[in-house]
Image (spheres, grey):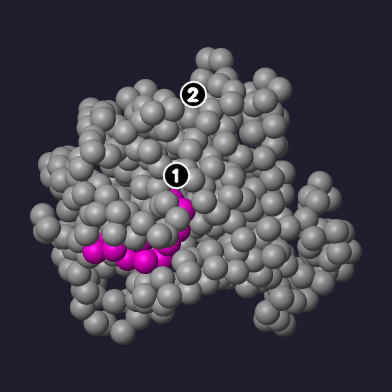
Amino acid sequence: MSINASPGFKFEIEKSAENSFARTGTLTTPNGVIETPAFIPVGTKATVKSVLPEAMRELGAQALLSNAYHLYLQPGPEILDAAGGLSKFMNWNGPTFTDSGGFQVLSLGVGFKKVLAMDSKTFRADDVIANNKERLAHVDDEGVTFKSHLNGSMHRFTPEVSMQIQHQIGADVMFAFDECTTLHNTRGYQERAMDRTYAWAIRCLDEHKRLTESRADKPYQALFGVIQGAQYEDLRRKAARDLGSLESSGISFDGFGIGGALDKDSLGTIVQWVNSELPEEKPKHLLGIGAPEDLFVGVESGIDTFDCVLASRIARSSAVYTMTGRYNLTNATYKRDFNPIDSECDCYTCQNYTRAYLNHLFHGKEMIAATLATIHNERFVVRLVDQMRAALKTGQFFDLKAEFMGRFKHKSGQHHD
Ligand SMILES: [Zn+2]
């Protein structure tokens, strides 16, 4: 038995691919089972924008991820606790994840764009992000002080506060509070941030243990440590070794998130450095990555679960995926096009609606435009990862990847809310 006797939570690897880190598995949580690898759609504020939870279930979503930062500011974690936890509150009959709030506190605070800059060739400076913009977050060794993006009120997150908030929210899988850096930070800053993340990881485990015991009447919540280290091999490997073997208060992490600055060109390499150091038997989640071609790279590099807002965010601005790339439904060429968004798609939208109708809805700013486009895009990414899982089981993953890469026009990056 592991030192984490975690009732209701376990991860079992079914099949490991030869010559790669890829594997299939089963992640069991108190609210249900996730067949991995799996894409986990994001419902930032306890809702996937414009789509009912029933429709998310119907399109094949196995779990949803919400953001602790947003739910802390509104409605407040005590409301979710009183409701019986996130899944009950949002009427989602399945597993849920929450991120720690670290990314949001820092990204909204220092004014990152929604999509982190992914070009590592640009110059680096620790203050570059705050240029021409009021700095709304301040990091110290104890935690982060930040200003709400909603009303400007001041707040402070520490590892303990993040754990308390995530326990109240009640998701099946939580993440340790980390300092998320960008590719623009200097090497020296990345080292300091990594040391801080390690110290915070210990405090997260201690507080998690305390809360798990004091809330013993609640379902078990798993805690994943977050691996930082930007694009540096030695830092990534050290972070993975240190957090992978970390024990405090008699417990260790149930799994791991790979986060922070990930240069697209080296995404697979970075994930493989990390996965060659982390305990193989524990689940690995890639934070904020969900562009279709990046999902293949992630699975090949040993990632079990992904979350990303990209599919739903671009859908609301009328961009949709197909197996040959993405296009925009508002383009004039679709005004009289009575084909579905994607003739190869089995989603509710593609079975029932045409490009012409969606073109009309988007131009008319009708609310169901977002709903129908989001259903399609979420189905596309959920199904794509489902296809990878099936292909891994039959030994055809690399055939599927080659076929997809040959057809799909690339466009990617890291995307969080
Ligand atoms: Zn579709």
Q: Residue at x 29, y 76 (%)?
A: 148
Q: Residue at x 64, y 53 (%)?
A: 61
Mark 1: C-beta under 8 Å from nearest atom of ligand 1: no
Check residue 21 in the rendering and tell me which mark sits there, or answer none.
Answer: 2
Amino acid residing under circle 2: Phe
Q: Residues within 10 Å of mark 2 (few under 14, many from 20)?
A: some
> Would residue 12 be seen by someone viewing this image from the given angle?
yes
Q: Secondary structure at mark 2?
A: loop
Q: Image check: 8 left or right of 138?
A: right
User: Is 170 inside the magenta-drawn segment?
Assistant: yes
Extent of the magenta region: 161-173
Residue 25 coordinates in the image, percent (x, y): 57, 32
Quadrant assignment, res 318: bottom right
Q: Residue at x 37, y 72 (%)?
A: 77
User: Is 205 inside the magenta-drawn segment?
Assistant: no
Quadrant location of the C terminus?
bottom left
Check residue 7 in the rendering and tell me which mark sits there, or answer none.
Answer: 1
Residue 280 coordinates in the image, percent (x, y): 41, 25
